Amino acid sequence: MAALLAMVSIAAEAAPREAPHEEAYITDQGADDVSVVDLGARKVVATIPVGGKPAGIAMAGDGARAYVSSTNGKYLSAIDTATRKVVARLDLPDECVGIALSRDDRTLYAVGFFGGRIFKVAAATMALEASAPVGGTPSGIVASPDGRTLLVTKRNADELAVVDAGTLAVEATVAVGHRPYGVTVDGEGRRAYTADVYGDAVSVVDLAARRLAGSVKVGKRPYVVALAGGKGFVTDQYAGTVSVFDLATLAPLGRIAVGDYPDGIEASLDGRQVYAVNWESNTLSVIDVASQTVAATIPVGDSPRAFGTFLRRVP
Amino acid sequence: MRSRVALFLVAGLLPAVGTAGPAGAQGCGPTRLKVSDSVVLPIPAAQLWRIVGGFQDMSWDGDVVLATGRGGDAIGAARSLKLRDGSVLAESLFRYDGATMSYATHWDEVALDRLPVQNAAVTLDVAADGEGRARLTWRAAFYRLLKPGETSPDAADAEALRAMAVYLRSGLAGLKARAEAVPHS
């Protein structure tokens, strides 16, 4: 018992004393809403009804708006984060999971799971501007840091597509592991990381060469990768863990037990924490990047997905 | 093999709604589903685990009439269950922990007419629930079966959820009946 108390006390001291004031917007797919979590107070401070089984999320760089995809409802919603209300909605002809914003926050992209199209939306007005086929059950999407391309996982094709962000033309496809789902790009646009659900691995793609640069074995059924402190953090759905690996050497650095069926994961803006939602446990795990330990577990709504970018700095 | 036929029949039709071939039937969907059920028995947790903790022994499950398998309790072990209605459920073991009294399986083959789900994983947990009592919790995570011409995702989700809930409930009901019929040691 004394040892347990000592561990608890160390964990408490390891938590940052003055965490930057950030919020997490968590899509609760089962509850049909978005939980707003104050990450300083570590509790839900608001719940925003969205409906339609929300899954994907893209947070504006300035934090003013959050965009959410509702799968069963086949629509996208724009949430004003100041008023915490849905301010616009766009119906689409398909169920979208992955959505992403351009780096200037002006264009929203969504990929249709069944029809295989990529949709280009004016974020301010939520008007559909264009769509084009990408195919292969597209699941995850992210914009490259230079804003020129979009990276899309083609789940059933075992490929990562490189798509022109302006024309939506597929410029290249890169063979990755089995059933890639989430995709994450580093800050320099040098490498992309796909979580290969059936491969139990992460594929590392060299974006300049547009080819596979390496692969890392992780826990069973990985979904999404977050990057922080020179490490990759991967949600392992079936294992109930977050696998950690070294971004330079791709060597495994251990696994962190979190909740059941961890799903969306993202690094905090200062890179000191990683936040992962646990879909089955209905919780958000706060992971300390340096010590690779769970610093806190926060209850959220039913069946959280938070698939995409869900963190914002509060002005 | 009726279930296997059903699996491929549906998968073959799936391109009509724009998704993949045979693998699609065991793929994932855009909306995740989960359902859990539990039963509390007046026996210690260790005793309950002895009854339900063997991956190859499903004699406690009221819905199972025959179980065959291989691999014991090792990761990757397989079992095939013949259910009371004659349908077959084939599962593989992907997590097993006797210390925490928990194991988890993936459904590899399922009678889709009875259980319209895909890519299901089911976790069985035993834990103490007060003095001399123990709770068995059964948790399923899955997706609805994607059918051609699906008009309402919500209705299809509801059907999948209902079918899974009935499956869990009937299995646990068998355990409860058996425990109540047998004097406790």
Image: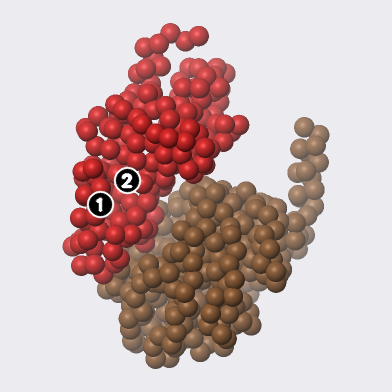
Chain colours: A brown, B red
What's the residue type where badge 2 is placed? Glu
Residue B106 sits above or below residue A170 on the image: above
Q: Chain of mark 2?
A: B
**Quadrant containing the N terminus of chain A in the rendered view:** top right
- Work out how far the residue at label 1 is from the one at label 2, CA to CA, in angstroms: 8 Å
Instruction: For the residues labelled 1 and 2, say whether their Cβ atoms are less than 8 Å apart.
Output: yes
Nearer-the-camera pick, A84 or B61 = B61
Q: Secondary structure at mark 2?
A: strand
Label ID, residue B7? 1
Please identify the residue farthest to the bottom as the structure is shown.
Answer: A167
Which image quadrant for residue A98?
bottom left
Relative placement, left or right, of A144 versus B40 is right
x 39%, y 54%: residue: B32
Residue visible at 34% across and 55% down in the picture: B26
Residue A218 visible in this rendered orientation of the protein: yes
Percent x, y of residue B95: 52, 42
Q: Is residue A114 left or right of residue A166?
A: left
State whether residue B137 is above or below residue A183.
above
State the SS at label 1.
helix
